[in-house]
Image (cartoon, rainbow, N blue to C red):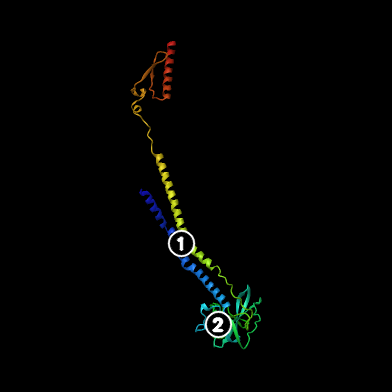
């Protein structure tokens, strides 16, 4: 009864080999990363996209509010106020302008005009006046200058982007940054800009081609997050399945080896011949007749001479040899008598 327990414990100990331990550690590590890093990362992006869609939907439907009501004390814009529709009054500064390059609008390369604007409340910020198609010869296309004088604008308050790791390029004397980062652009334009900008709505003073609003779609982030959760669940389940399959295979091999060993033992064991008391104590008559090594039996040939009778145990060839010699003697005696 102790044999199955010992074989089972030996089978479990075999899973503590370096290969199995590394596999188990990798599966557990993947499960931890899937649950704590990958799934939250994708689900977080889905949450950010959903909140942005809600803000855009609300901003389009609501009336604009004063810019000062949504900005912080340092002039920055909280992420929760991104895409808020605002209104502001002031003047453009047409000489202080940059072109945002390497942008795709409706799958078309474009440049976006970023012009400095001074508000009546004393704020200085960038206004994204829209885009123009990029020149295929990589030359700066003609840009309609911003209007002079005081204007009232309506647009969408936007959070500043991260600064590019590449310096701002100067093309035809016009700064062309890669991102809308007011601090980086302000250093080139010698302007102290607020850490946010306003994207002009359609039909506003100084607008070029208005930048279309983003598509209100959640993207694949939710499905990606669910997939990582599913992978985190399936990984340990798959490991358990393979361990169980390996244990079943080893038990099957052990059972086959045990059956083969039992079969070999049965074939190797001698089988005694059946015997009865009568056959054990009864011997043939020939075996019961005592014989001596030197005793001889005689028989008479056709001439009346005695011929030695050899034991029945002597080989047949030896008997033939003795008979031939004796026959020769008889023939010699008959010749002597004849002559």
Vertical position of residue 283 compared to residue 254: above or below: above
Instruction: Locate residue 252, reporting x and y percent.
Output: 44, 49
* Residue 29 location, quadrant: bottom left
Q: Nearer the viewer, mark 1 or mark 2?
A: 2
Q: Position of residue 42 (x, y in %)?
A: 51, 69
**Corner quadrant of residue 203:** bottom right
Q: Spatial distance from mark 1 to mark 2, Cα to Cα?
A: 53 Å
Sequence-earlier tag: 1 or 2: 1
For image coordinates 43% across by 13% down, the residue present is: 334
User: Can residue 46 be seen at all in this image of the molecule?
Assistant: yes
Q: Position of residue 127 (x, y in %)?
A: 58, 82
Instruction: Tell me the residue that label 2 is attached to.
Output: 65
Where residue 167 is drawn, which disc sits there?
none
Which residue sits at x=47%, y=62%? 233
In the displayed structure image, the side of residue 145 where residue 253 appears, left or right? left
Residue 12 percent location from the top left of the image: 40, 55
Viewer-proximal residue, 231 or 57? Answer: 57
Observer-nearest of 207 and 317: 207
Q: Is residue 139 left or right of residue 293?
A: right
**Residue where numbered disc 1 is placed:** 27
């Amino acid at each position: 009864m102790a044999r199955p327990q010992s074989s089972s414990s030996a089978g479990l100990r075999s899973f503590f080999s370096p290969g199995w331990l590394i596999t188990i550690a990798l599966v557990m590590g993947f499960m931890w990363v899937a649950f704590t890093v990958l799934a939250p990362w994708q689900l977080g992006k889905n949450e950010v996209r959903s909140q942005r869609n809600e803000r855009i939907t609300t901003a389009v439907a609501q009336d604009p509010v004063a810019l000062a009501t949504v900005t912080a004390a340092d002039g920055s814009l909280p992420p929760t106020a991104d895409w808020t529709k605002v209104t502001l009054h002031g003047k453009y500064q047409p000489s202080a302008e940059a072109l945002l390059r390497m942008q795709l609008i409706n799958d078309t390369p474009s440049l976006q005009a970023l012009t400095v604007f001074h508000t009546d409340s004393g704020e200085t910020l960038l206004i994204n006046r829209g885009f123009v198609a990029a020149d295929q010869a990589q030359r700066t296309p003609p840009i309609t200058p911003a209007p002079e004088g005081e204007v009232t604008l309506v647009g969408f308050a936007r959070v500043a982007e991260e600064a590019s790791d590449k310096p701002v390029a100067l093309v035809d004397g016009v700064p062309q940054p890669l991102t809308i980062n007011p601090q980086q652009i302000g250093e080139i334009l010698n302007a102290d800009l607020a850490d946010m900008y306003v994207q002009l709505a359609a039909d506003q003073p100084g607008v070029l081609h208005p930048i279309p609003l983003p598509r209100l779609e959640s993207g694949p982030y939710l499905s990606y997050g669910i997939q990582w959760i599913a992978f985190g669940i399936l990984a340990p389940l798959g490991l358990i399945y393979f361990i169980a399959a390996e244990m079943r295979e080893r038990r099957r091999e052990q059972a086959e080896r045990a059956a083969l060993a039992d079969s070999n033992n049965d074939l190797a064991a001698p089988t005694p011949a059946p015997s009865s008391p009568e056959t054990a104590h009864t011997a043939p008559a020939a075996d019961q007749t005592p014989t001596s090594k030197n005793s001889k039996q005689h028989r008479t040939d056709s001439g009346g001479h005695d011929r030695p009778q050899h034991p029945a145990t002597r080989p047949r060839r030896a008997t033939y040899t003795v008979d031939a010699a004796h026959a020769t003697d008889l023939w010699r005696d008959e010749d002597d008598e004849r002559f």
